[in-house]
Image (spheres, grey):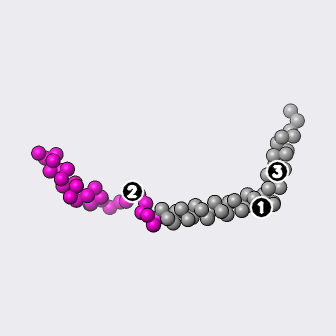
Amino acid sequence: MNIVRAMVRRIRIGPIAGRQHDSGMSTAEYAVGTVAACGFGGVLYKVVTSATVMSALSGLIHRALNIAF
């Protein structure tokens, strides 16, 4: 009988009642995180596809493929 009362009490009070910490993100935090990730991805794409970085990467790959063993 005590188990049933405890289950009913937990349902009525809710699983978070009495707790001081939050273990997840809210919808607004997900939205901000998604926008920040997209912005960072856009900046990273622009940096990697810039002429300076493309030339440096091409030179690095060219040197790596032409190493004499």
How packed mark 1 is, by other alpha carbons closer than 10 Å (few <14, some 14-19, many 20 or more), is few
Q: Secondary structure at mark 1?
A: loop
Q: Secondary structure at mark 2?
A: loop
Which residue is located at x 69 percent, y 59 percent?
Answer: 45
Q: Residue furthest left?
A: 1
| Left or right position of 51 against 39 | right
Locate the N terminus and report the quarter of the image it occupies. top left
Q: Residue 69's quadrant in the figure?
A: top right
Amino acid on which the number 3 mark rests in the picture: Ser
Q: 20 above or below 57? A: below
Mark drawn on residue 58: 3
Which residue is located at x 51 percent, y 66 percent?
Answer: 32
| Mark 1 or mark 2, earlier in chain | 2
- Cβ atoms under marks 1 and 2 closer than 8 Å: no
| Left or right position of 13 against 29 | left
How packed mark 3 is, by other alpha carbons closer than 10 Å (few <14, some 14-19, many 20 or more), is few
Amino acid on which the number 1 mark rests in the picture: Ser
The residue indicated by pointer 2 is 23
Residue 68 percent coordinates (x, y): 88, 35
Which residue is located at x 65 percent, y 62 percent?
Answer: 42
Amino acid on which the number 2 mark rests in the picture: Ser
Magenta stretch: residue 8 in it? yes
Q: Secondary structure at mark 3?
A: helix
Residue 24 percent coordinates (x, y): 41, 57
Give the residues drawn in magenta, as a range.
1-29
- Cβ atoms under marks 3 and 2 closer than 8 Å: no
Q: 57 above or below 40? A: above
Q: CA distance from mark 3 to mark 2?
A: 45 Å
